[in-house]
Each structure stands twice: as structure tokens, then as C-alpha cells.
Image (spheres, grey):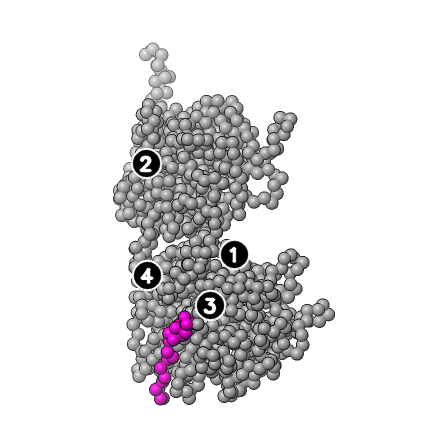
């Protein structure tokens, strides 16, 4: 009798882990006479992150370098994503995890300044493949609200919540003693605090004038040299943003009441113009009705025409429910562009980096909450550019994921040619404007494909070769089913409240291109790949009745040496028949009786036009049984060579012949065990009342993954693509099928020839061998039945079975046999040619000798079993306190190993067949069900998981890939000449020349402004300082790195010297003051009056 206990594993996750009452299994020692020569060594493994793909999750800020043409996006979790041309992207992370509130490029310098919500600013070096922080500055007494770095300046202005402005030297990352205090900036008669600084910019034509916007509506033009305000501009409404005209004579403010005010610099008394872009203009001349705030405005001039004014927000309050809009005002025309998601930020891209030249705007980059859109301002109608980045991973929430490295070479071109026909029309004809950086020079040349299944029933195929990601093809599985047109028409047989088409697991054979998917509504769809379009008059349907009880009609009599099972009228149904007849009773869904023989979804009855690509071959649906909904499918496998699909759940397993469209076997889990086996199961009675655990699990799998870890423990169950052994508390009484493996092996100990077999793994750790008897090929295969017989238990492991594989006597992996792909709609001659290329079966065994190894891995341990003797020759306990979430047998460095990902965050690899531990790294604690559901390993040392609802994180466990990573990664910084400054004649000497930086040095430098208070901010040298020194050859970053290193060498002595000097200066100043006071006291007195 087995003992069950439910353990709480990590961060509130509840998992049931079964264990035998026997002692802990120790790793088996290899026997001398049958050791396989193993080549893998520990030194060949190392774990590191490679690249992150997808849309930045919860974006918060954005910046663009107009010379390098690089886009940076910051997120609420402190992540930085940088994008260049298609295939050039980079991810880095601030350690604190605080939200990025603003980003500023040092234009064409290969550096970026980030300001965080924790009041720290950081300087990133982008001249190295993996950007690193060179310096950080943490403010202690002030909250940062706005930053501004003028073009070609080394002085960064920082506005604060208190209304003050501090100035930071980006070379040394030290504060200047020059501070603009809020009480000096506003009028002395003002009785209230002006609020935080919401805008800082210098006059495009005069760098000595700084425009400061306060939240309350006050704007101040500050003269940096005279340290006083030249003009103050007052308006009743709060300010959100300010934008200059390039000539520096006018600026525009956007306000909280939906108005735009235009001010002449020299006329501060009142605005030159007030407009409400979306306000209704009353006829009686009154003020228009207030609108929503205009959150941002940009004012861009063109040499040959009207200026562009681009703004976000400002819609009238009566547009409730209207989507977010971007408004483009150009001359007399106003275009309102609706967005799919709320706008986070936008930037207008211009031809010149110089603010004092005609801007010549050509595009607008709009950062939305869940998308990135670039609008072409140069074409009529403002079309959008086609986005080359893989940002659509989350178009519908990802529910499952599979990774295939080293696929057949012809697969990616085939999928791309089909998928290219699915692209939308109407994009801008111009090239994508974010075009900086260069691709990496990686040595990886093997094809890689990622498949993602989604909540809306769609499946996406991605080309993941060479650390890039590009969508190849999208398949919509929901097309097979009828859709409810209204809420009232929603079928009452649904077992999920939403996303009834969500993909739960999939099985794909890359060589034959056969695809099989299982959805949450207990349905399985078999697809074939074809390059030709067809119209299917009737979608072929097979309904299967699986229940948790013995039934003479549903299942054959399980015998130890039973003959091949033939399909009977009770276990198969012709798809041409209009009504299912698995039981004598007919389908019932009346209110006075329990639902019976009804599927959860209705297959469409009208003809189905199927485009080139994946086309439906067969739909299999589980039906309700006596008021009980069908249990969700937990495991799935397809084999193109045998023409079989097998799937299982907590009730048992079913084998379907998709060539003959018949159900071959429908058997309860307990019936798989032969009567002679010691692990024989007792029959279970069906549950009396419907339990909601299945529906809960459905909602979980179809959600976007944004779940709090402290949710109710029962609702924290999840389903994996290969195993669902941790599905719910119900596991105690239910043994589900957790994995399958088709193979050519020895079905019994006495066999001397290999034959087609199926290995079945259960959540209780049993591995059962099932023999398959296939008729000859050709027409006989379509007419004669396939025989199936259970051969009993092969082995027992602790925990649910996750993966199984077969090795030959030399330790080489024996993959399942397959039928090479041929187009099902091609001519008979082509089909015949492809059939002749079918691979030969495995060689037969020699008498009395084990020539195969079965590799079995469960949630707790791994075993290697010799075949046909069925003796365990190696075993290894993977974990005692946790459990394995995902395990795969993969190819790496020309051989094979087992890879495991545990719930405690450890990633491990074991050699084959001896199960020596090669790698054990505590990498990623399981904090989210999404990670458990999407983590998968692949060949060549590759793995991935969904790190957020919108992003895929790829990692490698190969030392070789880690060593070559620098070469393979793309370069962000490329040497580009900075465009020439505009020739402005007389004004060039006054405002445009290089002397302005000297003026700033004179103003803000230590000599003129003194030193800032040490308690105001703390300087923190970044970990990338040395790397920055190596990577930065010139420019501000190079100067900064050299200055920082020189300072570090003398840091302590300089600090002591500065303190002593400051004390002496204070003493001297005090003495001078006293002497001066004494002089004044006795100045006019005679000597005799002393």
C-alpha cells in the first residue's frame, strides 16, 4: 500500500509528492561488464542567460538615439530593453528592481542615463555587447521627477519633487554645487509651493536659458549665468509637458484640462494662443468644455511646410470607453489615431539631433502598455510600419511552449513560405526607422523552432535560430469549431468559463510535420502539413467516452498475454455517422436528466476552407459521462510511422488510428496492469457529483499567468505539457497518465526481436509496456486493424513519470520512427516516392543479450533499465525535498544526457546511461505557475521559459555556447559620424559653437559653483567600470571611465585632503569675518578713543 503526503513546496505552492515507504534510492554503481563509454564531463556544462524576446512587460519609459538609431524601453520592474534593426535587441536589469521613470541617451556616445523610482540615476555603457552600469548616484533627501541632458553636454539637469534642480556631471557622476532652488525660481509673492518639476529644457537658441515647468502651472525661464529668473509664465491649469519651437521664440504647454497654450518667450503676461484640440467650441464665445489631460505634446517644425504637433490624451469626457488616441495636428488637418492599448509614452523621430534646426519629423514611436507602434508621418493617412520585432508573443496569453533545436533544415523555409501569405496589408512602404546596431557573428548554424500554444486556441511557430526570434506561421485551431454568437448562445456543456479553445499540450513530429494538439475542453486535433489549399466538406470527428469505472463495452479484458485487441462496435465510431453510438443510449442534455455523450465544443458543420499549411485531419472529443464532464487531457503523443495518436487523463488512455479514423483502445489506468502484476489496481466507482477542480484547472491554464503566489492552494494547481502529476488534491485517489513514448523495443523479457511499442508513464511512478501490432503498409494498413496488448509493468519509480527514452547498446539515442513528410494533397507518384524513403526498422537483437537501455525519469528519481531483461542497472535520486517539474532527454556535444528543472529552482543534468550528476545550479526559484507551465529543454544545450506574460527568456547549459556568447550577441553601438551642426551665420558664434560647454564648465564646475552637500546624494561606482574602460575608446564614456579609474586610485587621500582643506577654509573664513567686524567697529575712532 502506498503512502501519500502533501508537501508545501516553495512560496505557497502546494504539491502532492508520493513516496514509497522504502529507503531512499542511492545512485547505482556501473557494472564493469556493461559500462558504455561516456564522453560528457562536468566542464562541458555551464548555465547562463542568452537572450530575452518579446514585448517588455509593463513598460514605463522610452528614449531614442537619433544618430545611432537605437530605441531604449524601461519597465516598472527595472528592466531595460534596447532595440536596433531586426534581430538586434538586448536586455539588462537594474539590481534594485525599481521602476524606470526616465531614460536619456548620450546621443552618439554609446551611453544611456536611467532614472529610477527609488531616486537613483545610472550611467550604462552600451559600447559592450552586454551593457553594464558605469556609475550610479543615489539621492537621499530628494525625489527625482524629471531629467534633461542637452545634446553634446556633459551636465545633466535633475528636477525633484521639492521643485529644486540639481546638476550632475556625467563624466564623474558627481553633483555640482550649482542648485536652482524653487523659492528663487518662482515669484516671492507666491504663497504656495509650485509642486514638483515636470519639465526641464534649454532654449534651442540659447543654452544659457533654462525653461523649468512646475506642476502647478508656473513656467520659469531661468538665466543660468545671472542665477535669476528672466520671465515667469502663469496659467491656472496644471502642466504635463512643454515643447519648444526650434527657433527658441515660442513654446507650447499641455495642461490637465485638455488645453494647449502657446507662449511667446518675451510676452509672459498671457498665452499667445489657447486651443482645446478635442473640445467642443460653444457658439456664445465661452470657454470650451474641459477635456481629459493632454499628457504629452511635441512640436516639430519642417523646412518646407507646416509644423507637426503630436499629442496624447486630451479627449473629451463624453468619450467614455473610447480607446486611447494619438492626435497628429499638421497645418489645418487633425488626425486622431486610435490605439489598441493605453499610451505609455511617445517620441517623434526627426532627421536632426540638433534642437535649433528644422526638425523634419518623419515618424512617431508610440509605446503602448502591450505593443509598440511606429507611425509614418510622411505618407497620407499615417500608415504604421511593419514591426520586425517578435513582440506578439502575448497577442493571446501563452498556455504551453515547446522548443526544438537542430530541426530538419527544410522546415523553416517551408513554414516561412506558408506564413508569409498570412501577413497583413496596408503597412508603410518605407524601411523600419529603428535601424541601429549590427548582428552577432555566431557560429551556431543549426535550425531552431519554438512553438507556442495560446489561450485563444492559436499556435505560433517561431524561427529561433542564431539567438533571434521571428514568427513563421500561425495556426488557428478554433476555426474547427462553431463559435457562440452571443452570451445567451454559449453552450451549457462548457467545462471552462472562458478560453474554451486554449491549447493545453501539443505533440509535433518535425520530420513528418504531423501535429497533434490537445485543448482544455478535452479535445484533440490531428493536423497534416500541405502546401496546397483544400476545402473540407465535413470535418472528420471521433467522440470518445472515457470514464473512471470498469466497462465491458468501453475497455477490453486486460490479460497478461492477451491477444491483439480488435476494435469493436463499442470502442470505435465511423466519423461519417452523424450520431455517436458508443453506448446504446443517445446524447442527452435535458434539464431533467444528467448530460451524457455530449462533447464540450461543437465541431462546425459547414465546409471548412483550409489554407496551405496545417490542415485538419481528425478531431477527437471526449464526451460527458452521466452528468460528469470529461477530464482534461494530461499527456499526448503522435507517431507518423504507426499512424497513431495516444492521449491520457486521470481516467485512463485512448489510442486512435488517425489513418483509419477509428478508436483502437479506450482503457482505464487500472486496467493496464496485468492480473499477474503485484501492482494490480482495484476498480474505482465513478464520482457521484461533479467536482469543480477540472474547471478551476482550466481557468488556470488559460489565464495570462498574472497570478499572485498567495492564492488559494487548491487553485494553485497547474498542468504541464508533458506531465500533470501535480494537478490537484484529487491526485490521492486518481492515477493519471503523465507521459508516453513510442519506440521499437522488446515488449517482453522473452522477446528477441524489436517491435513497435508504447511506453506509458503514470502519476504514481509506473511505467507500462504496451505492444503494438501493425498491419503491412499500403492499402492493407488502411483496411486491417491495428492490434494493441498491454504487457504489464516495466518499472516503478518514485513520483510521477515525466519523460522516457531509449538508447542502443552504445548509448546512442533511438528516436521514435517516423514517416518522412509528403504532401497529402500531392499526386500519387510523389506520395509513392516519399514512402520509399521510409527509414528501415531497428536491427534485431542477439540471443540472450541486453542491447537497449530504457531511460526513465520521474519527479523524484531517474532509472536506466536494460532490455529485454528489464533489469535496473542504474538509478539516481534527483531530489528528496522538492520535485522535478520538467525533464527531457537531450542531445549535446554529440551524445545524450537527462536535463531536469526542479521546483526549488535547481537545473540539473545527468549523464547517460550511468546517471552521473554533471551540473546542479540553483538558478530560478519557482515563483509563478507560468514558469512551470512553459519551461522546456532542447538539444544543443538550449532551454527557455516565459519569464513574464509577454517575454521568453532563453538560457543555455552548454559551456561552449557560454564561451561563444559574446560573439553571438548583437552589437548596439556602431561608429557613426555625428551630423554637422546647422550653419546659422551670425548666431553660430553666439549659440551654436563648442564654447557653450566651456561656459557650462565655468558655471557648474567646482571652481565656480563649489561642492554639493555630501548628504544629498551617494555616488556608487558601477560593476561595469573596468569593462567600460576597455570598451569605450573615445567620447564621454571613455573620458568618464578614465576619470573614474584615476579617481579611485587616489580616492581615499583626496577625501582626507578635501576634508582638511574644507576645515582650514572654514577657519580662515571665520577669522576673516571676525577681523572685518573688528575693523568696522574701530574704523572711525581716534587712537585715544580705543
Question: What residue sits right under mark 4 in the picture?
Answer: 445
Circle 3: element type: loop
* For residue 990, side relative to residue 363 (left or right): left
Which segment is the magenta one?
Answer: 829-848
Q: Along the polypeptide, which appears first: circle 2 or circle 1?
A: 1
**Whether label 1 touches label 4, CB < 8 Å:** no
Task: Measure the alpha-carbon separation of dots 1 and 4.
Answer: 30 Å
Residue 396: numbered disc: 1
Total labels: the figure holds 4
Q: Name the residue: 54% across, 59% down.
A: 456
Between 123 and 1049, the residue placed more toward the observer is 123
Q: How far from the left and from the top, in percent, is residue 403? A: 42, 64
Q: Along the polypeptide, which appears first: circle 1 or circle 3?
A: 1
Q: Along the polypeptide, which appears first: circle 4 or circle 2?
A: 4
Question: What residue sits right under mark 3 in the picture?
Answer: 825
Q: Along the polypeptide, which appears first: circle 4 or circle 3?
A: 4
Task: Measure the alpha-carbon separation of dots 3 and 2.
Answer: 58 Å
Q: For residue 845: magenta?
A: yes
Q: For residue 496: magenta?
A: no
Front of the two marks 3 and 2: 3
Between 144 and 802, the residue placed more toward the observer is 802
Task: Measure the alpha-carbon separation of dots 2 and 1.
Answer: 43 Å
Packing grade of label 2 (10 A; few <14, some 14-19, many >=20) is few
Q: Is residue 68 visible?
A: yes
Q: How far from the left and from the top, in percent, is residue 732? A: 56, 74
Circle 1: element type: loop
Task: Measure the alpha-carbon separation of dots 4 and 3.
Answer: 32 Å
Question: What residue sits right under mark 2 in the picture?
Answer: 979
Q: How far from the left and from the top, in percent, is residue 371? A: 48, 49
Amino acid at each position: 500500500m502506498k503512502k501519500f503526503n502533501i508537501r508545501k513546496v516553495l512560496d505557497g505552492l502546494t504539491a502532492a509528492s508520493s513516496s514509497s515507504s522504502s529507503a531512499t534510492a542511492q545512485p547505482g554503481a556501473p557494472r564493469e561488464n556493461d559500462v558504455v563509454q561516456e564522453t560528457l564531463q562536468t566542464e562541458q556544462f555551464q548555465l547562463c542567460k542568452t537572450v530575452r524576446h518579446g514585448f517588455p512587460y509593463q513598460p514605463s519609459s522610452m528614449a531614442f538615439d537619433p544618430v545611432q538609431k537605437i530605441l531604449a524601453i524601461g519597465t516598472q520592474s527595472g528592466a531595460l530593453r534596447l532595440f536596433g534593426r531586426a534581430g538586434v535587441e538586448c536586455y539588462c536589469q537594474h539590481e534594485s528592481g525599481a521602476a524606470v521613470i526616465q531614460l536619456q541617451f548620450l546621443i552618439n556616445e554609446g551611453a544611456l542615463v536611467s532614472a529610477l523610482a527609488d531616486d537613483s540615476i545610472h550611467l550604462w555603457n552600451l559600447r559592450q555587447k552586454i551593457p553594464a552600469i558605469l556609475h550610479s548616484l543615489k539621492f537621499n533627501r530628494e525625489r527625482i521627477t524629471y531629467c534633461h541632458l542637452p545634446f553634446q553636454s556633459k551636465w545633466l539637469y535633475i528636477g525633484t519633487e521639492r521643485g529644486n534642480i540639481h546638476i550632475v556631471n556625467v563624466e564623474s557622476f558627481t553633483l555640482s554645487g550649482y542648485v536652482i532652488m524653487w523659492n528663487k525660481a518662482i515669484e516671492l509673492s507666491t504663497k504656495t509651493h509650485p509642486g514638483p518639476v515636470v519639465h526641464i529644457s534649454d532654449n534651442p537658441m540659447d543654452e544659457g536659458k533654462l525653461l523649468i515647468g512646475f506642476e502647478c502651472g508656473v513656467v520659469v525661464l531661468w538665466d543660468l549665468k545671472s542665477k535669476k529668473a528672466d520671465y515667469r509664465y502663469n496659467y491656472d491649469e496644471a502642466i504635463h509637458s512643454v515643447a519648444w519651437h526650434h527657433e527658441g521664440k515660442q513654446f507650447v504647454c499641455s495642461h490637465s484640462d485638455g488645453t494647449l497654450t502657446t507662449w511667446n518667450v518675451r510676452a509672459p503676461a498671457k498665452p499667445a494662443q489657447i486651443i482645446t484640440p478635442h473640445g467642443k467650441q460653444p457658439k456664445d464665445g465661452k470657454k470650451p468644455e474641459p477635456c481629459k489631460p493632454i499628457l504629452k505634446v511635441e512640436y516639430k517644425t519642417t523646412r518646407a511646410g507646416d509644423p507637426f504637433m503630436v499629442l496624447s490624451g486630451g479627449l473629451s469626457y463624453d468619450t467614455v470607453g473610447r480607446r486611447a488616441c494619438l492626435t497628429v495636428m499638421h497645418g489645418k488637418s487633425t488626425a486622431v489615431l486610435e490605439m489598441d492599448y493605453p499610451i505609455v509614452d511617445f517620441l517623434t523621430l526627426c532627421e536632426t539631433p540638433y534642437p535649433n534646426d528644422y526638425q523634419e519629423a518623419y515618424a512617431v514611436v508610440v509605446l503602448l502598455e502591450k505593443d509598440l507602434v511606429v507611425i509614418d508621418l510622411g505618407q497620407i493617412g499615417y500608415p504604421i510600419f511593419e514591426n520586425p520585432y517578435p513582440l506578439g508573443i502575448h497577442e493571446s496569453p501563452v498556455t504551453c511552449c515547446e522548443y526544438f533545436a537542430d530541426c530538419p533544415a527544410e522546415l523553416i523555409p517551408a513554414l516561412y513560405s506558408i506564413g508569409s501569405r498570412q501577413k497583413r496589408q496596408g503597412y508603410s512602404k518605407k524601411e523600419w526607422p529603428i535601424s541601429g546596431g549590427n548582428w552577432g557573428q555566431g557560429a551556431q548554424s543549426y535550425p531552431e523552432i519554438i512553438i507556442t500554444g495560446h489561450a485563444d486556441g492559436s499556435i505560433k511557430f517561431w524561427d529561433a535560430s542564431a539567438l533571434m526570434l521571428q514568427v513563421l506561421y500561425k495556426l488557428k485551431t478554433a476555426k474547427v469549431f462553431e463559435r457562440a454568437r452571443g452570451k445567451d448562445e454559449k453552450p451549457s456543456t462548457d467545462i471552462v468559463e472562458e478560453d474554451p479553445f486554449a491549447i493545453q499540450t501539443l505533440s509535433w513530429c518535425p520530420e513528418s510535420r504531423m501535429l497533434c494538439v490537445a485543448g482544455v475542453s478535452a479535445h484533440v486535433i490531428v493536423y497534416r502539413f500541405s502546401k496546397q489549399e483544400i476545402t473540407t466538406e465535413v470535418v472528420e470527428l471521433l467522440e470518445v467516452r472515457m470514464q473512471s469505472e470498469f466497462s465491458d463495452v468501453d475497455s477490453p479484458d486486460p490479460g497478461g498475454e492477451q491477444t491483439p485487441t480488435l476494435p469493436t462496435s463499442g470502442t470505435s465510431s465511423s466519423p461519417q455517422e452523424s450520431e455517436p453510438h458508443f453506448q446504446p443510449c443517445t446524447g442527452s442534455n435535458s434539464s431533467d436528466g444528467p448530460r451524457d455523450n455530449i462533447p464540450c465544443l461543437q465541431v462546425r458543420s459547414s465546409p471548412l476552407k483550409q489554407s496551405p499549411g496545417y490542415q485538419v485531419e481528425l478531431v477527437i472529443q471526449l464526451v460527458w459521462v452521466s452528468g460528469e464532464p470529461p477530464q482534461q487531457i494530461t499527456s499526448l503523443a503522435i507517431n507518423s510511422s504507426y499512424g497513431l495518436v495516444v492521449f491520457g487523463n486521470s481516467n485512463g488512455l485512448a489510442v486512435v488510428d488517425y489513418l483509419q479514423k477509428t478508436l483502437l483502445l479506450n482503457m482505464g489506468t487500472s486496467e493496464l496492469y496485468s492480473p499477474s502484476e503485484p501492482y494490480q489496481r482495484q476498480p474505482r466507482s465513478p464520482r457521484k457529483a461533479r467536482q469543480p477542480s477540472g474547471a478551476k484547472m482550466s481557468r488556470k491554464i488559460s489565464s495570462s499567468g498574472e497570478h499572485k503566489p498567495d492564492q488559494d492552494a487548491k487553485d494553485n494547481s497547474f498542468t504541464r505539457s508533458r506531465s500533470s502529476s501535480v494537478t490537484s488534491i484529487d491526485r490521492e485517489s486518481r492515477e493519471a497518465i503523465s507521459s508516453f513514448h513510442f519506440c521499437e523495443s522488446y515488449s517482453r523479457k522473452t522477446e528477441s526481436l524489436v517491435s513497435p511499442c508504447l511506453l506509458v508513464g503514470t502519476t504514481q511512478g509506473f511505467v507500462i509496456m504496451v505492444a503494438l501490432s501493425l498491419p503491412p503498409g499500403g492499402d492493407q494498413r488502411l483496411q486491417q486493424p491495428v492490434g494493441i496488448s498491454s504487457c504489464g509493468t516495466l518499472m516503478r519509480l518514485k513520483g510521477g513519470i515525466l519523460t522516457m527514452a531509449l538508447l542502443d547498446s552504445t548509448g546512442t539515442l533511438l528516436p521514435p520512427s517516423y514517416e518522412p513528410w509528403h504532401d497529402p494533397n500531392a499526386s500519387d507518384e510523389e506520395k509513392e516516392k516519399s514512402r520509399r524513403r521510409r527509414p528501415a526498422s531497428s536491427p534485431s537483437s542477439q540471443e540472450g543479450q541486453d542491447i537497449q537501455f530504457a531511460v526513465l525519469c520521474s519527479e523524484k528519481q531517474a532509472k536506466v533499465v536494460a532490455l529485454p531483461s528489464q533489469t535496473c542497472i542504474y538509478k539516481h535520486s534527483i531530489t528528496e525535498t522538492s520535485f522535478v517539474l520538467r525533464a527531457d532527454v537531450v542531445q549535446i556535444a554529440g551524445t545524450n544526457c537527462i536535463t531536469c528543472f526542479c521546483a526549488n529552482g535547481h537545473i540539473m543534468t545527468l549523464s547517460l546511461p550511468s546517471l552521473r550528476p554533471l551540473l546542479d545550479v540553483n538558478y530560478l526559484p519557482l515563483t509563478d505557475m507560468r514558469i512551470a507551465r512553459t519551461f522546456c529543454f532542447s538539444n544543443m544545450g538550449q532551454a527557455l521559459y516565459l519569464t513574464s506574460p509577454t517575454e521568453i527568456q532563453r538560457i543555455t547549459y552548454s559551456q561552449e555556447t557560454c564561451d561563444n556568447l559574446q560573439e553571438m550577441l548583437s552589437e548596439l553601438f556602431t561608429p557613426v559620424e555625428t551630423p554637422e551642426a546647422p550653419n546659422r551665420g551670425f548666431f553660430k558664434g553666439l549659440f551654436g559653437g563648442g564654447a557653450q560647454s566651456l561656459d557650462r564648465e565655468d558655471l557648474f564646475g567646482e571652481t565656480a559653483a563649489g561642492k554639493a552637500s555630501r548628504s544629498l546624494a551617494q555616488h556608487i561606482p558601477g560593476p561595469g567600470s573596468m569593462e567600460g574602460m576597455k570598451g569605450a575608446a573615445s567620447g564621454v564614456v571613455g573620458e568618464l571611465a578614465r576619470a573614474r579609474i584615476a579617481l579611485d586610485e587616489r580616492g581615499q587621500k583626496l577625501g582626507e585632503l578635501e576634508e582638511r582643506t574644507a576645515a582650514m577654509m572654514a577657519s580662515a573664513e571665520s577669522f576673516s569675518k571676525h577681523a572685518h567686524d573688528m575693523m568696522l567697529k574701530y574704523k572711525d575712532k581716534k587712537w585715544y578713543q580705543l
